[in-house]
Image: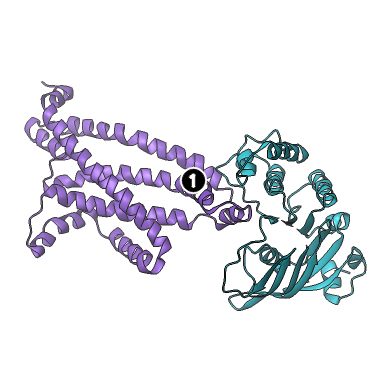
Amino acid sequence: MESVFEIIYKYRDAFAGGLFVTLKLCLITWIVGLVVGGSLGILSVKWKKAIGIPVRSFSFILSGIPILVFLYWLHYPAQTLLNIVVDPFYTASAMLTILNIFAVSDIVRGGIENLPNQYIEVAKICGLSNKKRLFKIEFPLIFRHIFPPLLITQVNMLHMSLFASLISVEEIFRVTQRVISIEYKPVEIYTALGIFFLLISLPLNGIALYFKHKYGRNLSER
Amino acid sequence: MIVADKIVKSYNGNKILNEISLELNRGEISVLFGPSGCGKTTLCRNLTMLEYPDSGTLKVDEQFYQFPSKNNFPVMPFPKVNMVFQQLFLWPHLTNEQNIKLAINDFNKEKNERFEYLTKLLKIDDILTQYPNESSLGQKQRVAIARVLILDPEFIFFDEMTSALDIVQTNNIVKILLKLKDVGMGILIITHNINFMERVADKLLFMYDGKIIETGNKNIIKKPQTEILKKFLGI
């Protein structure tokens, strides 16, 4: 009887392929989400009515839609309506990226809006230039405030990438399911997958918690 | 010299400062007192021009400001006129030393000597590497004072500086204030501490409901002229 390690070794190419797809999915989601979401968050503060309110409204609506429904809707009805066929990988990337963009945007906007204005006033009265105020006071304080939730959100995106398997994206969960259907060892293989995700997620969550504790304590002095 | 004339400031239609006129001189300690919510902090914020008054005029030495103004002012009163906030607002991500030095652009030998002198004077030379959250309230207060003093201000406003200090710390602050006065700095202090104001004040300003009701030397708390001040002092 084969051990779980032997099974993983036997299907190493398939697992590696699945892992590659998962990482590709995550990289697209993380990079686009952080860049576009971050920009949207900043713009939401700057132009509250024109950008802030629509972004917040959309984010609010999005938070009420189950991920699976959103994914299926993007994959089936939306494509039927538009009369197009999109590769499931791109559909999954689009869904995760949209979710990440609005999650990041909310975090960034909250971080900027919650920065106590008095820190800026003190900088102003002490005669700090706008540039110094931005780079030495505003940016570091906001970054410390938003870094832990951003990190946790990105880990959540990694976990959510598993939903892509439901529209036939050949990512790691899908590959795992295929292997299980051949080997009939669901407990062992799902456990191995769980441990694999734990090994990736726990250090990131640990870093987030460390910074949350470290910086949260400092900021609590307001 | 700072001369304010008929300064008015309203928030949401409520007049917080109602035609305030006052004069602050160098080498003089003025104490502003009055019940909570009467507009003391708002007055300081308007005198430093962190907020612009709705109307009135302000003169800081030769610089004249008239309100309302459609144009931006080319020269602001700060950092020459500066303020230590009640809640201090030390930047939490910077060490005490970085908090003090951040506003200095060209940190030359002269500035470094001043930094060392101030940190010794304020007895904070042993906590410079600490972060504000690692320092006691008294220490943080002295760091906040050093952060302002290193800028060499000509006028400095202290908002409720003794509210959380014990007797020893208050005595230290009194000594520092008297030294600052001796070097010609103009000081305005907001406080509720009658004993403290008696010790340091050259001039007292009693504020009530957005107006300066009584002004004078220490005698105004011994022999108040108005019923409002008598009632405030419990006489």
Residue that numbered label 1 is attached to: A140
Task: Name which residue lies at 17% across and 46% down.
Answer: A164
Q: In this rendering, would B217 be left or right of B15?
A: right
In the image, is residue A18 above or below residue A98? above
Quadrant the N terminus of chain A occupies = top left
Spot the residue most to the bottom.
Answer: B13
Task: Name which residue lies at 84% across and 72% down.
Answer: B214
Residue A209 screen position, x and y as percent = 43, 39
In the image, is residue A188 above or below residue B148? above
Report the number of numbered marks. Answer: 1
Q: Secondary structure at mark 1?
A: helix
Whether residue B38 is visible to the viewer of this picture, yes or no, is no
Q: In this rendering, would B103 be left or right of B196?
A: left
What colour denotes chain A?
A: purple
Please state which of residues A167 and A78 is positioned toward the viewer in this rendering: A78
Crowdedness near tag 1: few (<14), some (14–19) or many (≥20) residues, C-alpha within 10 Å: some
Residue A90 screen position, x and y as percent = 15, 49
**Colouring rule applied to residues:** by chain
Task: Name which residue lies at 65% across and 43% down.
Answer: B100
What colour denotes chain B?
A: cyan
Please state which of residues A179 and B164 is positioned toward the viewer in this rendering: B164
Task: Name which residue lies at 86% across and 76% down.
Answer: B227
Return the chain for callout 1: A
In the image, is residue B25 above or below residue B108? below
Residue A91 screen position, x and y as percent = 16, 52
Please state which of residues A209 and A30 is positioned toward the viewer in this rendering: A30
